[in-house]
Amino acid sequence: DAGVTQSPTHLIKTRGQQVTLRCSPKSGHDTVSWYQQALGQGPQFIFQYYEEEERQRGNFPDRFSGHQFPNYSSELNVNALLLGDSALYLCASSPGGVETQYFGPGTRLLVL
Amino acid sequence: KQEVTQIPAALSVPEGENLVLNCSFTDSAIYNLQWFRQDPGKGLTSLLLIQSSQREQTSGRLNASLDKSSGRSTLYIAASQPGDSATYLCASTSGTYKYIFGTGTRLKVLA
């Protein structure tokens, strides 16, 4: 059984560009959450998707948006990239209504 | 608003030493408290999860305890090894479906 997978593993962009990160949840999981982890910090909650809707959102600007597809996979989009968006982006999945989340390996984004 | 703090921020110990990592949280109404390990540049590996009704969990050389009344959790690592070197993160959930993480403790075990 494959765990949570994320693509790409690494990405380099320049300021002002847009980026899309992808996540496939663990089999049987219908809820996907996204986290941003800056260097030396703990992960910060961005938002969570359930039944193709954003269920909850952390303190991130509207430049961060997402989508969940009918197969429960998810995308994180970031527009107008800033240098401060450089971070490890983690995806986590869970069965709906269950608190415990399973984390993927992350996508490391570098904005130059 | 839940805040999670981890002390110390960094720790260096000789191989074989027993050690304790600390995690404090401000809101005692937590659902779960989970400890993770993170190797440099990598994702999170779940170590132990303690549900709010539990006091501790054990896995091999690791033991995690939870004291909701004092807002604390500890991760005890017995007989530390160089392979234990990593950043250790604790995270709480409070029925809102999101994890609140501490900033982590960077552990280095010297051979």
Image: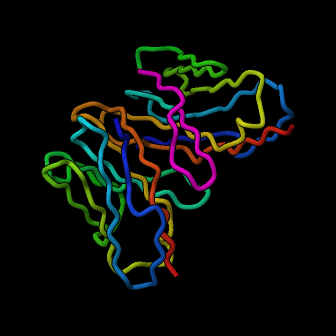
Q: Nearer the viewer, residue A107 or A81?
A: A107
Give the residues in magenta. B35-51
Against B98, is A73 above or below? below
Q: Is residue A89 left or right of residue B102?
A: left
Give the percent coordinates (x, y) of residue B37.
58, 39
Numbered disc total:
0
Give the percent coordinates (x, y) of residue A81.
40, 78
Q: Nearer the viewer, residue A4 or A53?
A: A4
Identify the residue at horizontal 21%, vertical 35% (top origin): A96
Q: Is residue A27 left or right of residue A87?
A: left
Give the percent coordinates (x, y) of residue A65.
26, 65
Q: Is residue A64 left or right of residue B67?
A: left
Identify the residue at horizontal 63%, vertical 52% (top origin): B40
User: Does the magenta stretch mainly form a helix, a strand or a loop?
Assistant: strand
Indicate whether residue A51 is drawn in magenta.
no
Q: Quadrant of the N terminus of chain B?
A: top left
Identify the residue at horizontal 40%, vertical 53% (top origin): A35
Identify the residue at horizontal 69%, vertical 45% (top origin): B106
Give the percent coordinates (x, y) of residue A75.
27, 61
